[in-house]
Amino acid sequence: MSGRARLTVCAAVATLGASCALLPLVDPVGWMVQAAILLTIVSGVGALARRVPLARPLTVGAQAVVALLLLTVLFAHDKAIALVLPGPDVFMEFGELVQEGVADVSRYAIPAPVTAGIRLLLVGGVLAVGLVVDALAVTYRSAAPAGLPLLALYSVAAGLSQGGAGWLWFLIAGAGYLLLLLAEGRDRLSQWGRVFGGRSTGSGRPAFSGGQSYAGTTGGPAQAPVRTGRRIGALVLGVALVVPAVLPSLGGGLLSQAVAGRGPGGGGGTISAVNPLVSLQNSLNQPEDRQVLNYRTTASDTRDMYLRIVALDQFDGTAWKPSERAVKDVPDRLPDPAGLSPEVDVTPVNTSISTAPWYAQNWLPLPYPASRVDIAGRWRFEPEGRTLVGDRGQNTRGVQYQVESLLVRPTARQLKESPAPPTGLAREYTRVPESLPPVVRETAKQVTKGAGTAYEKAVRLQDWFSLNGGFTYNTEVRAGSGTEAIARFLEQKEGFCVHFAFSMAAMARTLGIPARVAVGFTPGTRQSDGSTSVGLKDAHAWPELYFEGAGWTRFEPTPSRGSLPDYTLSDTPSGGGSNVPAPQPSRSAAVPAGPSPAQSCAPAERRVGPCWTPPARSASGPAGGGPSPWAVAAIIIGVVALPLLAALPLLWRLRTRSRRLGGGRPGPGVRRLGGGRPGPDAATATGLRTARLARDGSGRHGGGAPESRSGTPAGTTRTMAAWQELVDSGWDYGILPDESLTPRKAAERIVRIGELRGPAAEAAHRVAASVEQVLYAPHPHPAPGLAAEVHRVRTGLHDAASRRLRLRALLAPRSAARAVWSLSSRWSAFLARCATSRPAAVARRAAGALRLSRERT
């Protein structure tokens, strides 16, 4: 396989490897096969175009046209001309699909269904990234920058999955990129001839700065840079994996799930602390109430049939999430609920539940407290929260199961007379972070002022939120972020169930009442056939407070949602002193019976994880939900930084030209003046001049020309700097340097391709003649005025170029690549110094320690 063919294959493999990070985001994954086929076709077109050969822009253009035709056939063939050629209707269809895809991405939770819009975003995105990678790595022979689109592809996947892209996908993406770099390195080295390995002789340093020896060269062989690059790449990949796991401050690293314990999907013995709350706000704002599950129950009244998924018992001041707890096999009968006394009235209930084919949740919705669950599949039981969690990928998609549960009916008197909870339980479930704003504790004390028992305080908190506190239920409100989110909610008094549940549970803990947050569904809507349908908009969160004798007890602080429990409707006066009104009707009773929403469900829908995840902690945020000062600062910095970044090539080129042509202090040699890798002419000049000085045995050359600090005559340095500037000027205007030509031939090539006439052409020849004179004359006399000659050449190139080429030469000069080469060389030199200095330092320390020990003895 030729070098370019190998690069083409590696570019496609690297793109597909990075694309694997997108697999956990959607389900099913058949789109990946389509993307792979289309990417293979586009890569093949590029290989054929390069074999013809076509010009580089034409090669990329041909690939882009073929990619557009393929997307047209796949997504909009009914709007295309002859099913293939795109017209205005095709582009309108693409626009609509993209809009639908963006809306679906924000609407659905992970894994999202592969709608037409999402499929276009996935396949089109992979195809676009693959085209860019192929163009950079193969067409333009620059594999290193090709890592940026690959990184962007992986970063998008990791960002959407909130760090759930996983270490495996990162390894695949990183390995693909390293394979691409290795293929490019081998291709470049193959153009130089056979590479010899082994150790260098003499001082131990390689004969060439590149670290390698070729056939026909003198000196000892050295280590091939491909081998060194492979080691560096492996080291960097290892650091990227290990550092996030070792440094807790980085958080959310690639190994965050692994170090937290094997999660429910891994068959381990614990539930990792992965937050199960996935966008309840989006669920409640769905335009259509899709059915999640359907159940039949023996309970005569379903107002208290809340279907609980998971309990969030860990509160860090920013978010509620489940603790990492041990799981075990599901027993035939679940243990009795903690704290439940025989004196409390319970009613056994049997419920048959079936979930929608699209509903894929790791936690199983259950009535609380369940005493027996009959379900097939790989499920595990977590005793503390009394939840069932899927093992090794098991989820709730289209499952049917039977549940025996208890309908616990404590009385207000029993809750009021409840004894103190166990010390260990109270200590764990009343813990609040120091970062909790003081207003939360102060408001809780004010609302419950005069209440004598924990039960009375709980009822007053519930009534304050749901009845007489002036709160408004609104699913459109911004969730807020950071430790001040609860304080802002208490001030604005507007939110949805998450705000109410989180706030009441936090306030209860400040009062010494054990509390946690439950996530699940309200009872749903009774159907005409006797079953009950639970839809997207039934997703809910509510607080659970612990009372010894009744166990974990549900409260309902969210206005107009669910139903107030009967045991909270006592004669205890509310916080505002008003009488407690009659219980509000539940949502189940308010919605009229009708056909099941499942009749209109699409075959693929979103997985509902029933709650909201608070954003990452921030120091503060505006109360009105607008952009924070940090966001404004970031925008300002971005607006200022982008033009500066775009102007860097221009600024570097101006500075380099000034130094070369005498506008600044000349550097200590041609390499320094060139700003990067010196061309063979500059290297030859330095080598020949050094050999001549050594042969003459003097510190001055010939007629006593002054020398630069590098030992090269200053006139030679200025001449070679002017020549380097002339070559780079031609490069800026599209004349690539040819390192195999002599100065005279190179000048003739610049004159011919640049269409130089008159004084400009003569100036180019004079500069070339001066270079030959300082290189080969027995007594060189550098010509004066070379800076003016180079300016004449640049003026001629500018006059003969098109307007587009002039702008390109000014704003994005090609010779600015020397800056990248310079940084790369300095980095390689730094690594080499580190590699060589570390053993020497260790040896010196060991010798010193040995000498010290001898002196003491």
Image (cartoon, rainbow, N blue to C red):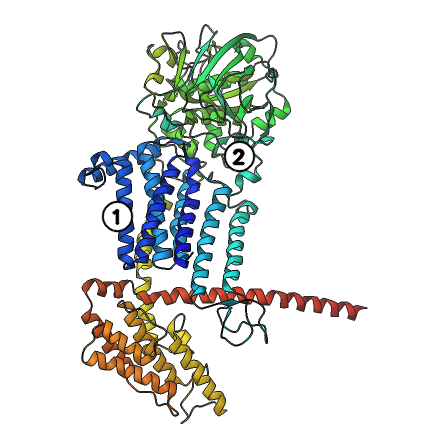
Q: Is residue 469 above or below residue 814?
A: above
In the image, residue 843 sits, relative to residue 219, either above or below, namely above
Q: Nearer the viewer, mark 1 or mark 2?
A: 1
Point out the tag, 1 or 2, that comes first from the N-terminus: 1
How far apart are the alpha carbons under marks 1 and 2? 58 Å
Q: Are marks 1 and 2 in contact (CB under 8 Å)?
A: no
Q: Does residue 83 appear in the picture of this structure?
A: yes
Q: In the image, what residue type sits under mark 1?
A: Val
Res 619 label? none
* Residue 160 in picture, x, y percent from top left: 40, 38
666 and 362: which one is in front? 362
Q: Badge 2 local density, few (<14 within 10 Å), some, or many (20+)?
A: few
Give the quarter of the figure containing the C terminus.
bottom right
Q: Quadrant of the N terminus?
A: bottom left
In the rendered image, which residue does mark 1 sit on? 65
Query: Could you tell whether 455 is left or right of 525 in the image?
Result: right
Q: Quadrant of residue 372?
A: top right
Q: Residues within 10 Å of mark 1 (few under 14, many from 20)?
A: few
